[in-house]
């Protein structure tokens, strides 16, 4: 039940962030799929990329992790049909908005 709640929150966050950030188009069905794909990418790919880019992340005081988030959003956009991101900066601001929206939802749910 808790996993279903997190999936619904992630889907709603993607829809809200896509509404806020221009250059992102998403349908409700592709938002459901994108939530699963982004979750899987964050679970399996992100730790590997984080370890490989640890020196630059330390050098930028953690800000490079936002670039990693943007790259993962672009990868999810390439995988999920109906989830389109216009470019890197669009993905960057989408990932930033998604992080803030998820944080607000999880504050509200606790």
Image (spheres, grey):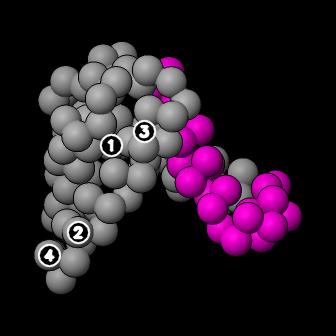
Name the residue: 62% across, 48% down: 68
Instruction: Kindly check if marks 4 and 2 are in contact, taking CB atoms under 8 A apart as contact.
Output: yes
* Quarter where residue 64 is shown: bottom right
Instruction: Kindly check if marks 2 and 3 are in contact, taking CB atoms under 8 A apart as contact.
Output: no
Instruction: Tell me the element at label 3.
Output: helix
Residue named by callout 2: 104
Instruction: Kindly check if marks 3 and 4 are in contact, taking CB atoms under 8 A apart as contact.
Output: no
**Magenta extent:** 52-78
Q: How far apart are marks 3 and 4 (CA)?
A: 24 Å
In this view, the residue in front, 63 or 41, is: 63
Disc 1 crowd, CA 10 A, few/some/many (<14, 14-19, 20+): many
Residue named by callout 1: 35
Name the residue: 55% across, 31% down: 88
Provide the major secondary structure of the magenta segment.
helix
Residue 40, percent across and down?
Answer: 48, 46
Image side of residue 21 versus residue 76, left or right: left
Q: Say whether residue 71 is magenta.
A: yes
């Amino acid at each position: 039940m808790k996993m279903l709640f997190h999936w619904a929150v992630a889907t709603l966050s993607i829809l809200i962030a896509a509404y806020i950030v221009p250059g992102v188009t998403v349908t409700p069905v592709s938002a459901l799929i994108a939530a699963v794909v982004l979750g899987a990418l964050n679970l399996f790919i992100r730790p590997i990329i984080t370890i490989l880019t640890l020196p630059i992340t330390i050098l930028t005081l953690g800000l490079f992790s936002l670039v990693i988030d943007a790259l993962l959003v672009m990868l999810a956009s390439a995988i999920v049909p109906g989830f389109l991101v216009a470019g890197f900066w669009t993905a960057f601001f989408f990932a930033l908005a998604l992080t803030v929206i998820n944080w607000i939802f999880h504050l509200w749910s606790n």
